[in-house]
Amino acid sequence: MEELSFLEKLHNLQDTYGYIPEREISNLAEEADISRAKVFGVISFYSMFYTEPTGKYIVRICDSLSCYVNDSEDLVKAVQDYLEIEDGETSKDKKFSLEVVECLGHCGEGPVMMINNKTFTQLNEKKALNILKECK
Amino acid sequence: MGERQLLKKEATTDITEHNFSALEKALTMEGAEVVKEIKEAGLKGRGGAGFPTGLKWELALAEEADDKYLICNADEAETGTFKDRYLMENVPFKVLEGIIIAAYAVGANKGYIYIRGEYSKPIKIFTKVLKDAYDEGLLGASILDSDFNFDLRLIKGAGAYICGEETALLNSIEGKRGKSRTKPPYPIQSGLFGQPTVVNNVETLTSAREIIDLGAEEYGALGTEESKGTKLVCLSGDISKPGVYEVEFGELTIREIIEELGQGVKNDEQLKFIIPGGASTSIIPAEKMDVDYSYEAIAEIGSSLGSGAIIVLDDTHSLLDLMVNVSRFFMDETCGTCFPCKDGNKQLNYLLKKAVQKGGFTKKEIELIRSIGETIILSARCGLGQTSSNFINSIFDNYQAEVLQRGNEDAEN
């Protein structure tokens, strides 16, 4: 039970670099004695792992049903306009990445946005933009 | 009438404030006796499928192996569901007790709690819970000075709904893509690393803790014949007072849950329908909501209690837009192994989006969509695909006239 699980290793790399660099994929493959393709396959399966650098702040907005009926799409639009990026894009200054995601598990407090590990609930356009302005 | 609190009671995140009475009691019993209590109390899995927990434990106890695993499934991601988060944030030591009791009952020596990666707060809380529990002798060797040894580790998910499916979860813990496995063999026979494995939902394990604490007789006196005890209900959507409520089965109707606990539809709009157990379950129209909240009563009207996520929808939304939203969820979240689920859900989303553009369906299109849905249900090997078209089909069942394209002759064919 002592050794780190593969998922934990990937989390650590993701947290360290903000993405999982190619040389680390090679290291993991060698360590586990599997192909690099296999490691890449695992990484690409999970939406919280990246193989390309992301923005300093990853902004995730939930657009699943409970948030959707509480106007999450208006929130998405406001954030897109403010950051000037679309879903899945990273801003030119590498500060923000935006992702419209499925259920974040705060369905009673929608609409909901996560910035890195922090969750913000009961948002409206103004609140959300104020939070983004605080991201330095 | 109102809430009936068992699980929600005695909230604390401080180990010195929590009374481990249920665990102490369990450790004085034989594993088989604990299993018998759970069976007698009639506990059903609270994650969505409703499989009898006592039976699962009994089968696992009978397995012989060097290692046996107990996994707490905290990969809560069904749309509308946030009850397991509530438990982990408010009564984490009850969750922990449930895990240890289950492990003891089935004879598991190793365990994992798999928490979805987006749940930062529960992850933080449980990291400390595990540390405190090891320090206090509640985990590791000779738990509470008994001869029971059990190690528990936390695994953080990484953003994949499918990993809440038990066999996908096993692959994920093993460091693989979170694809579901073909059953049989069931995890009880060959689960994590090929060893016998019990996977239980957070609320299931916490309920097991309450059963041991109260005794099967007292717990089983709550609820109905087929649905015993209490259930956490998550109210969300167009509702005045959303949140997690604990109800005794059979005590309230769905309408009462919405009107009395949730204070009715918000902004005084008209209720259209509810989804009783997350996006994987069939809708219940407003006029059928005077039904008791129990597994059997909801099954009788053609839906499922699911995870307990009641999503309330008023009549201001476009049904077509709601269908697109739900279909996108399954398109995004399929693991991609079974071709009909991978491609079928994509096709459904495409056809639904097309219908939005032209303002409705022709009857032929409805037939096609139903046929694709049917194919997915029949051929998908796990619960995701098998339930992914419930919402869409149930909209057609109840509101077909409303979603037909108007002014198009073809619509009548």
Image: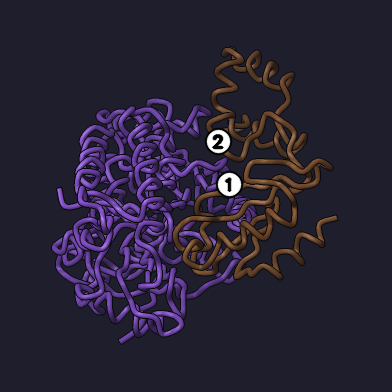
Chain colours: A brown, B purple
Task: Give the residue displayed 45% in from the left and 75% down from the top.
Answer: B9
Query: Foreground residue, B250 or B202?
Result: B250
Q: Can you identify the residue that label 1 sits on? A: B117
Q: Is residue B85 above or below residue B334?
A: below
Query: Foreground residue, B327 or B408?
Result: B408
Task: Give the residue displayed 59% in from the left and 21% down from the top.
Answer: A39
Q: Can you identify the residue that label 2 sits on? A: A46
Task: Give the residue displayed 57% in from the left and 39% down from the top.
Answer: A47
Query: Residue A104's x, y, as percent?
Result: 54, 55
Residue A79 visible at all: yes
Query: Residue A111's x, y, as percent?
Result: 57, 65
Quadrant in which the N terminus of chain B appears? bottom left
Location of residue B60 by image quarter: top left
How far apart, in angstroms, are the residues tagged by discs 2 and 1?
A: 10 Å
Query: Residue B407's x, y, as percent?
Result: 26, 57
Asked if badge 2 and badge 1 are on a common chain, one would say no
Query: Residue B36's x, y, as percent?
Result: 23, 54
Task: Give the residue displayed 29% in from the left and 55% down from the top.
Answer: B281
Q: Is residue B20 above or below residue B60?
A: below
Residue B28 visible at all: no
Q: Is residue B310 above or below residue A14?
A: below
Tell me if mark 1 has few (under 14), some (14-19) or many (20+) residues whose alpha carbon lies within 10 angstroms of its own: many
Host chain of mark 2: A
| Amino acid type at image mark 1 | Gly
Q: Give the foreground label among 2 and 1.
A: 2
| Residues marked 2 and 1 touching at CB (< 8 Å) | yes
| Amino acid type at image mark 2 | Tyr
Query: Foreground residue, B59 or B65?
Result: B59
**Left of B22 or right of it: where is B282?**
left
Q: Which labelled disc corresponds to residue B221?
A: none
Host chain of mark 1: B
* Element class at badge 2: loop
